[in-house]
Amino acid sequence: MGSLQATEALKLLLNIGKPLLGRLLVYDALSLSFQEFSFRRRTDCIVCGDHPTLTHLEPENDMAAIDSWDAQQLASTLSGGNIDGLVMVDVREPYEWETGRLPGSLHIPLGQLPGRLAEIPDGRVVFICAGGVRSLSACRIAAQSGRDTINLEGGIYGWAAAFGPPPAP
């Protein structure tokens, strides 16, 4: 596939051969076959039409309110006493929560979060999970409801690597 793409680029740059303009080449690896489809540019296309309306890319709206902090940034904020309006929500499962948690964090498992958003006090919300993936999902859920969110990158694992495991209850 890479060789085909390079060949097409060279044909365009050198103005030689018949480039794959207005055609789509489809490769079927299972049957080791190619198919070619012809198409025309749509004049009403919002990207490449005669009057394009989509002229630049913008981030998804729900991602605009999501920040990411590492363990050091969170620890610095917590130790600096600059925690007014900061709420920590741990979205791990109950068995994970019982092994250790950051003091002062609320526990709302990710699967329950959409129905329990109202339980989170006003302010910026730091979502925490084991490795930072579920907390990013939590950020997206909360951001869609207009909340200002922060994802703890690396989650509890990142915290443990920097400061040791959080205390168990």
Image (tube, rainbow, N blue to C red):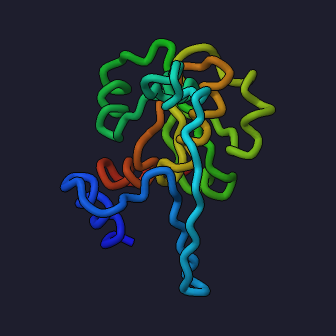
Q: Identify the image quadrant of the N terminus.
A: bottom left
Tell me the residue at 57%/44% (across/down). 40
Image location (x, y in percent) of residue 168? 53, 51
Is residue 162 rendered to the left or right of residue 51?
A: left
**Number of residue marks:** 0
- Decide which of 79, 114 is in the foreground and name it: 114
User: Residue 30, how many percent across, how many down?
Assistant: 60, 85
5 lies above or below 111: below
In this rendering, the answer to whether 32 lies above or below 103 is: below
Image-quadrant location for residue 99: bottom right
Residue 166: % across, % down: 45, 48
Which residue in the rendered view is the most extreme toward the front? 17
Q: Which quadrant of the figure has residue 18?
A: bottom left
Q: Which residue occupies the extreme bottom position in the image?
A: 31
Q: Is residue 167 visible?
A: no
Taking the spot 52% from the left edge, 50% from the top edge, the residue there is: 133
Q: Nearer the viewer, residue 44 or 112?
A: 44
Q: Which residue is located at x 41 percent, y 43 percent?
A: 153
Q: Residue at x 59, y 40 (%)?
A: 90
| Foreground of the two, 114 or 13 | 13
Q: Is residue 162 visible?
A: yes
Q: Residue furthest right?
A: 115
In terms of depth relative to the viewer, which is nearer, 103 or 147?
147
Name the residue furthest left.
Answer: 14
